[in-house]
Image (spheres, grey):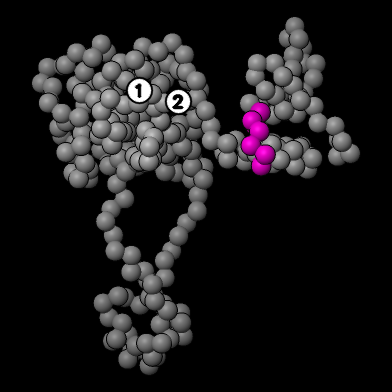
Amino acid sequence: MKPFGFFGLVTLVGFMLDTVNLNWIPQNRVEDYCREKNITQAQVNRNITLLTDSKNDVITVQLTDPIDADDESFGKTLGNAFVQAICTVMNLDDSEINGLYQPIVAQNGKIVVFETSEGGTGTLAAIVKDHNLLKRIALKSLEILHYDPTGNNLNGACLDACYNCICNFYNQRDHKLFDRNLVKDFLVNLSASDSLEGSKDDNILLDQFLSQAKSDLERTILKRLKQEKFRLPNETQKIISKDGEPIAEADLYYEPKLCVFIDGQPH
């Protein structure tokens, strides 16, 4: 299983480019290359870093109640179990899902799980929409950590963590933090929950709503709501039905039953 929150310890020296002949130069033979091509060191562009930008589906988990344990140990233990459970339940390759633990001063840290493929595969979106799927992932997390669905130890259970549960070569630096006992009650409660209430980051919601907007006026109002820190709608372009027949389309819709219709010249 690949690591949770592991991105390697890499010295960023960048690439070197021959600006005259437009060739990449091997790091270990810069001087020889310059002599061969009859160029000066000043004609070599150094420390070029290649970057890519992508949009990926993300789930963040942050407990609102205080954690009666070390927050980092709780977060990294739960995060590793979650990522492994998602891959198993959703039949994904471990290269398709990754995650990290984000510490926050004076608050519980966040567990961030994200899809690695551009645009996302829909896996994480399915989890937040399907309560039963989330329960299956919680149950699989318990099993990975050597617990049965009620939180009792399975045969051969380890003390805190082991290579048969969440320890692996890549997360060695976190082994001392892992403690499966810290997350047991949380996972048992999650697996037995009867409802699911998720939320999206306002920036993600705004981007989604702006792409769905049918006029510049709608886009302007949505941006103004965000700018003035007003609550964003739960949905846009909401079809309102009565007795199974559509009767209206609300430009903005707030749960439980507030419809906003935007009128103006663009409409």
- Say left or right for 106 vs 179: right
The residue positioned farthest toward the right in the image shown: 265
The circle on residue 42 is none
The residue positioned farthest toward the top in the image shown: 243
Secondary structure at badge 1 equals helix
- Say left or right for 225 vs 15: right
Determine if residue 96 is in view: no
Crowding around mark 2 (Cα neighbors within 10 Å: few <14, some 14 to 19, many 20+) is some
Q: Could you tell me the amino acid type at mark 2?
A: Ile
Place of residue 237 in the rendered image (x, y in percent of width and height, measured from the top left): 72, 28
Pointer 2 residue? 127
| Span highlighted in magenta in the image | 227-233
Q: Main secondary structure of the magenta part?
A: loop
Place of residue 241 in the rendered image (x, y in percent of width and height, measured from the top left): 74, 14
Question: How much space separates mark 2 and mark 1, taking CA atoms?
Answer: 9 Å
Secondary structure at badge 2 equals helix
- The residue positioned 58% from the left and 40% from the top of the image is 203
In the rendered view, tell whether residue 144 sits above or below residue 224.
above
The residue positioned farthest toward the front in the image shown: 106
Pointer 1 residue? 137
- Number of marks: 2
Determine if residue 95 is in view: yes
- The residue positioned 16% from the left and 16% from the top of the image is 153
What is the quadrant of residue 246 in the picture? Answer: top right
Crowding around mark 1 (Cα neighbors within 10 Å: few <14, some 14 to 19, many 20+) is many
* Cβ atoms under marks 2 and 1 closer than 8 Å: yes
- Say left or right for 241 vs 72: right
First-in-chain label (2 vs 1) = 2
Place of residue 122 in the rendered image (x, y in percent of width and height, measured from the top left): 49, 33
- The residue positioned 45% from the left and 44% from the top of the image is 117
- Image quarter hosting the C terminus: top right
- Whether 213 is among the magenta residues is no
